[in-house]
Image (cartoon, rainbow, N blue to C red):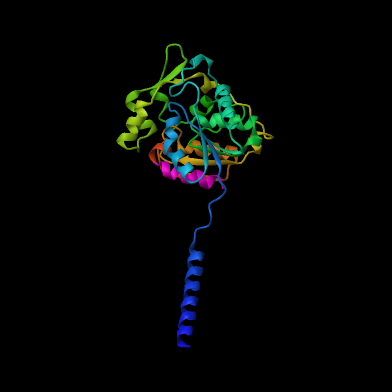
Amino acid sequence: MKTSIVRMLCIAAIIAMLAACAGNEKPPAGTPKTYVLVHGAWQASYVWDSVQADLVKSGNKVIVVKLPGHGTDSTAVYQLSLDVYRDKVIDAIAQADSNVILVGHSMGGMVISGVAEKIPHKIGKLVYIGAFLPATGQALTDLAYSDSASRLGPLLIPSANQLTLDVKHDSLTYLFINDGTPAIKSLLLANYRAEPAIPFTSKVTLTKANFGSVNKVYIKTLQDIVISPAMQNRMIAAAGIDKVYTINTSHSPFLAQPHAVADLLIKAAQ
C-alpha cells in the first residue's frame, strides 16, 4: 500500500514538473516571412550577408536584390534611373510565392517607395532602415540637400561628366561604418565603387491609393551622419509612420550590428 502511495506521489510530481516546464516554453515563432532586401548607395548586396543568414536561420525566406550599376554589375551608368532600380526589385519580388517584407536602406528607401506605388498588393510591409522616405514629387537630392546635419555633401566628388558621384576615400569608413570593426571597414573599402548619379535626381510619384495603402515601419540609425537622426525624424513625421524602432549605430547597421538588425526585421514584420 505504501509503495502504491509513493508511486502515485512520484507520478503527480512528474506531472506537475512537466506542466511547469510547458508553462515556461517560448511561444512558437510566427509564420515565416519572405524578406526582400535592397541596399543603398555606394554599397552592394554583400552588406546583407549576415542579416540574411540570421533571417534564414529563423525559418524565413530572403531575396537580396543586386541593383544595376553596383557590385560587379557593368550596366552603363547613363542607362540607370530610379525606375530601372524599381523594376529590378519588382522582378525580384515576382519570385516570391507570398507577399513580402520589403526593406530598403538609404537610397534604397527611394527605390522601395516606387515599388510600393507600382505593386502595393505584393507588399505586406515596407521597412526603411536609415533610409530616404520621400513624398510624391521629391527626388533624393531634394531630401539630402535639406539635411543640414549630414556630413556627406562636402565629401562628394562628381565625375567630369556628372554621371557618377565619388566619396573622398579617406572619409568612407568615417561616413558609413565608423562603429565597425577593422575587418568590416576593410570589407566596405574593398567593395566600394563610385555611385551612379542620375537616380539621385529622379523624382517619385506616389499616391495614397497605392503607396499610402502599404504599412510602413522605420528603423532609425541614431549615430548616422549621412542621413541625420533629425532628418529621419522629419521624414517619419511627414509620412505619418507610428511604428518606429531605433538602433544605436552608424549609417550601416547591417555591418555594425547585423544580429540586432535581423531581430528588428523579425519584430517589424509582426
Task: Classify residue 144 as left or right of residue 174.
Answer: right
Q: Which residues are magenta?
A: 257-270
Q: Taking 76 as reference, is 237 above or below it?
A: below
Q: Taking 109 as reference, is 80 above or below it?
A: above
Q: Taking 242 as reference, is 120 above or below it?
A: above
Using the rendered image of the protein, determine whether residue 236 is visible from the camera's viewpoint. yes
At which x and y percent is residue 105? 49, 34
Task: Classify residue 197 as left or right of residue 94.
Answer: left
At which x and y percent is residue 205? 63, 27
Identify the image quadrant of residue 96: top right
User: Which residue occupies the foreground of this view, 175 or 17?
Assistant: 17
Identify the image quadrant of residue 206: top right
In this view, which residue lies farthest toward the right?
Answer: 209
In this view, which residue lies farthest toward the left?
Answer: 182
Identify the residue at image location x=45%, y=11%: 161
Total label count? 0
At which x and y percent is residue 260? 43, 45
User: Which residue occupies the foreground of this view, 54 or 257?
Assistant: 54
Q: Taking 49 as reference, is 75 above or below it?
A: above
Magenta stretch, main secondary structure class: helix
Using the rendered image of the protein, determine whether residue 247 is visible from the camera's viewpoint. no
In this view, which residue lies farthest toward the top?
Answer: 161
As for residue 240 lying within the magenta part, the answer is no
At which x and y percent is residue 31? 57, 48
As for residue 264 lying within the magenta part, the answer is yes
